Image (cartoon, helix red, strand yellow):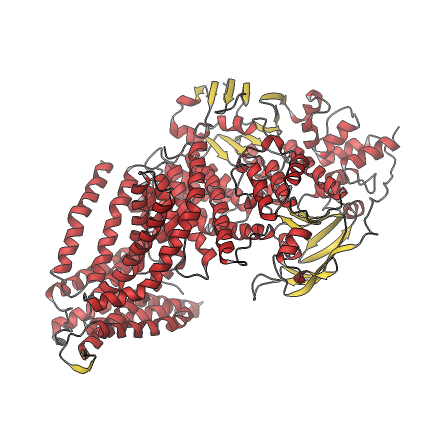
Amino acid sequence: MAFVKINNVSFTYPNEANPILKNINLTIQQGEFIVLIGQSGCGKSTLLRHFKRELHPHGEMTGDIFYKDCDLEQLDSEVAATDIGYVFQNPENQIVTDKVWHELAFGLESLGVDSQTIRRRVAEMANFFGIQKWFHHKTTELSGGQKQLLNLASIMVMQPKLLLLDEPTSQLDPIAALEFIQTLHRLNKELGITIILIEHRLEEILPLADRVLIMDEGSILFDGPPKEILKELPANHAMITALPAATKIFHQLSGVGPVPLTIREGQRFLSTQQVIPSHLPPSKSQNEKNIVLEAKDIAFRYEKNGLDVVHHFNLQVKEQEFLTIIGGNGTGKSTVLSILSGLQKPYRGKVFLFNKILKSYSNKQLYQQYLTLLPQNPKTLFVQKTVHQELEDMARLHKVSEKKIQETIHLFHLTHLLNRHPYDLSGGEQQKLALAKLLLMEPRILLLDEPTKGLDAHAKEELAQILKDLQAKGMTIIMVTHDIEFSAQYSNRCALFFDGNIVSEEEPRAFYSGNNFYTTAAHRISRELLSNAITCEDVVTLCKKTCV
Amino acid sequence: MKAFETFHPIVLFSFFVAAISLSMFFMHPIYLAITIFSAISLNIALRRQLFFKDWKLYVPLFFLMAIINPLISHNGQLVLLYINGNALTVEAIMYGIAIATMIVAVMLWFSCYNVVMTSDKFIYLFGKVSPALSLTLSISLRLVPRFRHQLTQIVQAQKVIGMDYTTGSLWHRIKCTMRILSILITWALDNAIDTADSMKARGYGIKKRTAFSLFFFERRDGFVLAIIILLFVSNFAASFIGTTTFYFYPTFGAVKWDIGSILFYSSYFALLSIPLAIEIKGALKWRSLKSTM
Amino acid sequence: MQKNMRLIISLIVILVLIPLTLYAGITIFADRKYYFISIVIIFLACVPFFLSFERRKPQPREIVVIAVMSAISVAGRALFIVTPGFKPVAAITAITGFSLGAEAGFLTGAISALVSNMFFGQGPWTPFQMFMWGMIGFIAGLLGKTGIMHKKIPLILFGLFAGVFFSFGMDIWGTVSMYGVFNWKAYTLALTSAVPFMIIYAVSNVIFLLLLERPIREKLERIKNKYGILQ
């Protein structure tokens, strides 16, 4: 008996000419751990929603879905609600009530389960997930990672057989994301729960998956175990860039034999390649350029009697450089950006902008001619009903010429999106729109707060390209991020922020090869042989050069 | 040591309903004295420093309210003097003081209520009567801090693009504020769909909901609740008989000191001092426990 | 069974409890307990609204939208810390009423009051606030059916009305009933103390309504069209 069976399912959204799902056929066995991947807009979220009857999207569907040989449409509503659980992308939105314990009980309350049973099931889950410590907390007080664990736990109390997750870690920092993925792994291994997961972070998830589904334009392009992806995927397919570092290196070196997925497997593969230990020249620095932004001995705290979030903070930013500041979650990286941009005032120390103290600039001068800050949530900038109106709104506020608007639309590839509502864009497109809006003001320094959060590999590449173009035109870029890979690949200088100040800063090659743990996957794979290769490209270039 | 607030919400709520409604009702001097005394002492027990801070608010309020009555009411027989042909009477002044005492006492009860009846207790009780509304309330309560946080983010983002709502002309400020609210609303409504989906996905609306809670109704709760009800009924009876009635106009009525009345006064005092008694008992118990440890 | 019970309860409330309270207020407790009586009556007056919502078994999306609008009107107050009385609650409630109907309007107003006081402290004013804001939403919902409430003049008139109405309930009736003195002096005193607030309420309502009515209506429409709620 197939656990879930999808027969010839096609789906079209209202007012759309083309179907988003085209004749999908799938059979899922109980206990499988399936990762569903694909570029944004390929229909993967739409497909996932089809497994959960309550969340079927509005539109026209043909074909049948069976759960345990029963037509999903005919399934008893209680079974449908309990047996199939769904975790959404945004950890905040799916929390309903104000207390952790109440949230855990919510589903069972809806099913009319008696208090005694609820008490027992909630206690079980709180133990399994380690929630006891914050069981009585308010849901707003939790961290992002805790919120997403709570969401998972509040579905697990209903004892589902099938768990569907739509990019559950995209809004989490890397450590919380890893913890979440490991919890999923436990649920699958220890309880045998079937899992279908949409995910961007393939580095950690692929080694754990039994089966991978790759979607492309509404159809399933690949369906098989993760080790076989390379065999069937076209050699230059867009999804290749999203694969784990070990797999990418294997692919680019046209490796033979078992495909490596993890760091360890990658190291093993590389050791068979007869690579001669070697190193690359350090990346080009902007040392000779002028200092445009400088922070001297900054100290800042939010409350008078609180702790210093930032202290003894010093930083020099050179013209036209691309600086990334990396560091753990909640350490105050975003606070640093708001201090550098003048939104928060330090209680000690000074910020200098073009050798003049920051305070001496009026807000108008500062934000219209010198610097701008891309907020972590681009939606905080959207006021209008269409992308085009958003840009015009900005142009009206700052008297920007029509020509400039057209240029920006072109630069950011927004032409096909002009009539869309900003909220109907994908995460990457929203990020681009927000950036486009800000750059209408023509600032000279661009500050970005965690811009790669929630973006897939393709959107990240696109963002990187835009940033590189801007830099080439003279823009100075300062970016705060968790994203080590992005920082290693694209920036000119990296700084590690810890405990309120910058602990180390260097050009990326020196920086990441100097770190043992806080470094890229490619470096961890190649460290033994190649002293300073930090990206997959580095590893591949050196290997091609040295091994014959 | 907090003792009273560990009781079952129904007990706490019943107490406050009884205390607040009776306090609003009784204008008899003895009753007023009991009311204000109990309200103040419970406040000291539960709120300490906060209570002493609040005096800055209560004292002027008391005087303001006490003054208003003689200004608008000229009834009464004991005339002190005439202002513009209007009598200023002792009765009106005393009635003003009585009203002011009552209002301050009610405010004090409410500040105790706010400490003891936390939102989850109210939502739990309310959920027994009206599940859908209590859920709406719970969601709303969760959203307020979230929206506040989002507001600060929007405010900052808008400041960077020159829409700072704290500077500029009045019209500019108003425009910026509306813009900020508008951004918040779009964001909030869009996210709300996920929340609703998450409710639906977890079976909301399939069956009649049960109300789960972490509260236990123990024997002591039953005991205290019974006492509250009993004393409330006895005070109700007292008001029916007329013991609690006191006339300020045309001139003061008499305060009765017969045994029946004294018993009724005591029952009022007993009712209002329940929480304080529980607090004191709890504190003593804790002290003896600590000394034997 | 459950349904009938609730219907019976709301009938009992309207037909029996409210008149009974009034009667008790006039006869047994003749001693000027108007303030107390008004609180009880206002509280009872909210009950039928709540019960009919409960009886209807509201969909998750309705519940969430009402919760969101109430939370916005409460959280929105953070932007107006420096301006007392200048608050968006009445306007947001009214706009919700225009778009989503009388019931949603009432609930948004009443829940805004309740939630707001959960953060700032409950007091004897809670039932008044709940009822007054609730009624503003309710009346807005009824007027919304006429289809003219997106025009400027009706909005201005409604804003003024809502300001005066709210002030009457909260300030004037509050003061007068507290003292139980019903003469011209009492009215004038209450009125003069209330007028500044009344003006602030009315002016702020008009400003908020004019500036927020279109954006909020469009946003609610968008949600309605995109996800098909509240139809």
**Count of labels in the image:** 0
Residue drawn at x 43%, y 46% as measured from the top left: C212
Residue A116 in view here? yes
Is residue C217 placed above or below B262 in the rendered structure? above
Q: Dividing the picture into quarters, in which one does residue C218 lie?
A: top left
Provide residue A337's location: percent of width, then percent of height. Answer: 65, 53
Between residues C32 and C122, which one lies in front from this camera angle? C32
Between residues A271 and C203, which one lies in front from this camera angle? C203
Residue drawn at x 67%, y 56% as measured from the top left: A340
Q: Is residue A120 left or right of residue B235?
A: right
Q: Is residue A470 left or right of residue B121?
A: right
Provide residue A246's location: percent of width, then percent of height. Answer: 73, 33
- The single residue placed furthest to the bottom in the displayed view is B81
Between residues A526 and B189, which one lies in front from this camera angle? B189
Residue A137 in view here? no
Query: Looking at the rendering, in which quadrant would you find the C terminus of chain A?
Result: top right
Q: Is residue B8 left or right of residue A51?
A: left
Provide residue A47's location: percent of width, then percent of height. Answer: 53, 26
Provide residue A248's location: percent of width, then percent of height. Answer: 74, 31
